[in-house]
Image (cartoon, coloured by chain):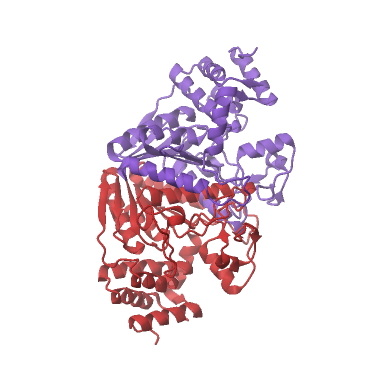
Chain colours: A purple, B red
């Protein structure tokens, strides 16, 4: 089915409110999830709603939490999110980072005691309208093995950087540090097709092209896939994300990051609180005249679009292009939902007694 | 031959001084190059000395430059390095970043009008003794093609992050954002061995395993190697490095970054000045008690070392481990130099009339 984003957004907000969440937080949650669907990151949109609801039901997400700054300097802070849903806490933290950047050029907030924050790009892109560069990273449930390893130690640990331009649209990088994202693996599993070598190993550490191995204890490889192609670099990037999100904030890290699925309990003797994120903003005019910067960014973008392509039919694109194009389409034509997700949302509707819009 | 690092360092310093460089800058240059050799990054150590000397002779590196802060806020600054060698300007900028971090929690300096800065880890690691996390990136001469492209648009654009620990040694990531580093390609070319698929394409855009294709107009691929394995992510990271180093600072970017080799002239109508870097530091206690952080970092490192390995003979390591081990060895036993580099250094010795230590 295809559904208009506004209708879906109101319904998602009402679902969160039915769980006791205040209007402002519920609206915020709906904003992040719907933006994911609009941008084509379907794995991180309403497909995750039932997962969040189950975590609320289990008491592993606190609605209406106390978000407390535990420590700060003029350009840094640590936020204890009080068990908040990450869709709310990262947004809150990014506002603090932008405020600090306004005052002193840059602002950085490490967040502990939080939960999954949706698409990283949502939070990084908050900086753009302030003529700032935004940065957002998060750790996540362990699914990825470090180079040489055969154990789930890291999440898909994304990095997002959003950089404003002038006449051209902003540069928006949002990438998992694993060889393949969760979304791509889910699609392959649903379609029952073989995946490329270099995405997965089975639980013994053997290369596998069967996406269902992940449910049998297999693991995702880091960006680079094997040592020859730099898997230790993907591991290094993922580790950097984990340390900033988990260790620097006082959240959990590595194999201790609590699982997103509610049927798996967190490990005992956790070294920190909840899941962690790290967000920040640099003011462009902390470095350079904004107009000069934007004019050079436009030049950068145009020059890179004009890179000599291998095949003229597949030109070089700019990070964020595919998502922006889908956004422009879906904001008009609506968000397509696959049957499995519709069924899942209808179950949420029944359980929460928030009428599914098409019912 | 094998040479003690102190002897080599003094000689390198004297070579730079023979070109009119002041004692402090010449010492600084020698420090960075020798640290590269000690850490086993032989491609970025004294093997590059003759290249720097030729750039000085051609007037493309200014000795004793004026390093001027062009703009600043409490936590940010832009440094025009006045044509300085990057080995000096990045060190200078990192000191400013550390000073700003001391005052307000974090510090960021974009550097324009500079030249190649050696190993990124040198600059990032400067933060460690201050209980800060260091960050250093730079753009570099175009050699790498964006995903889908067949044109040299980016350098190997490294990212370094240095994070202090307690009893454990620091976490030091220093990685090229390309599928293979310059150093690895040089070694393959010297040994005349085939390289893995996924490192290079020839000038037509065809996959190649011949390392000499690079001299015939070929290009290096980004981390991820192909679209299926996330080459667009390596491109995105490399682009992020280029934009921060080049566009944000007012230096050149993309295909306009001046070549390191003196026999190639910079392109006409450059959009900026020289090569650019971007360095920064976050104070650990801007986020968390230093002892608590270090204790968790030790736990992080120990847990990751104990990851279940695929093969017990190749355990999971921590970024920086191999370089630190080589450093410990070479500081005692000396730095091994291959014949080609010794011959190159002896030519420098003759031209500068600074006696080669073993002559």
Residue B337: percent from the left, percent from the top? 47, 77
Q: Position of residue B329 (x, y in %)?
A: 46, 71
In the image, B307 versus B49, the foreground residue is B49
Q: How many numbered marks have been drawn onto this rendered protein structure?
A: 0
Tell me if residue B158 can be seen. no
Query: Image quadrant for the N terminus of chain A?
Result: top right
Q: Horizontally, is A214 left or right of A38 in the view?
A: right
Q: Quadrant of residue A156?
A: top right
Can residue B228 be seen at all in this image of the molecule?
yes
- Give the farthest residue toward the bottom: B359
Position in image of residue A209 (x %, y %): 72, 46
Q: Residue at x 55, y 54 (%)?
A: B222
Q: Residue at x 34, y 68 (%)?
A: B29
Q: Position of residue A276 (x, y in %)?
A: 47, 37
**Which of A123/B334 is in front?**
A123
**Near-viewer residue (B314 or B43):** B43
Vertical position of residue B96 compared to residue A60: above or below? below
Pick the quarter of the image with the C terminus of chain A: top right
- State whether residue B60 is above or below residue B237: below
Decide which of A198, B127 is in the foreground and name it.
Answer: A198
- Residue at the spot 46% in from the left edge and 23% down from the top edge: A28
Q: Is residue A281 above or below residue A56?
A: below
In this image, A164 relative to B19: left or right? right
Q: Quadrant of residue B105?
A: top left
Vertical placement of residue A209 versus A102, above or below: below
């Amino acid at each position: 089915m295809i559904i208009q984003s506004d209708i879906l957004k109101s319904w998602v907000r009402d679902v969160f409110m039915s769980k006791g969440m205040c209007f402002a937080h519920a609206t915020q949650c709906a904003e992040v999830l719907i933006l994911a669907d609009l941008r084509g990151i379907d794995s991180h949109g309403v497909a995750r709603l039932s997962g969040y609801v189950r975590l609320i039901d289990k008491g592993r997400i606190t609605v209406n939490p106390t978000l407390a700054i535990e420590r700060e300097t003029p350009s840094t802070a640590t936020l204890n999110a009080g068990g908040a849903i990450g869709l709310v806490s990262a947004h809150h933290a990014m506002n603090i980072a932008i405020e600090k950047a306004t005052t002193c050029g840059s602002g950085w907030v490490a967040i502990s005691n939080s939960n999954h924050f949706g698409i990283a790009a949502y939070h990084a892109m908050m900086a753009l309208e302030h003529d700032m560069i935004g940065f957002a990273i998060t750790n996540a449930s362990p699914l990825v093995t470090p180079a040489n390893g055969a154990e789930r130690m890291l999440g898909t640990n994304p990095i997002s950087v959003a950089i404003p331009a002038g006449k051209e649209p902003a540069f928006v990088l949002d990438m998992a540090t694993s060889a393949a994202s969760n979304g791509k693996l889910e699609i392959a599993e649903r379609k029952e097709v073989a995946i490329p070598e270099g995405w997965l190993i089975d639980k013994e550490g053997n290369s596998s092209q069967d996406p269902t191995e992940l449910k049998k204890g297999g693991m995702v490889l880091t960006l680079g896939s094997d040592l020859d192609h730099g898997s230790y670099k993907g591991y290094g990037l993922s580790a950097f994300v984990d340390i900033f999100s988990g260790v620097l904030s006082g959240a959990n890290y590595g194999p201790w990051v609590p699982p997103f699925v509610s049927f798996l309990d967190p490990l005992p003797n956790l070294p920190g609180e909840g899941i962690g994120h790290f967000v920040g903003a640099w003011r462009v005019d902390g470095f350079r005249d904004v107009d000069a910067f934007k004019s050079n960014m436009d030049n950068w973008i145009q020059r890179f679009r004009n890179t000599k392509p291998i095949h003229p039919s597949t030109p070089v694109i700019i990070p964020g292009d595919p998502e922006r194009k889908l956004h422009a389409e879906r904001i008009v034509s609506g968000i397509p939902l696959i049957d499995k997700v519709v069924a899942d949302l209808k179950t949420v509707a029944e359980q929460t007694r928030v009428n599914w819009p098409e019912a």
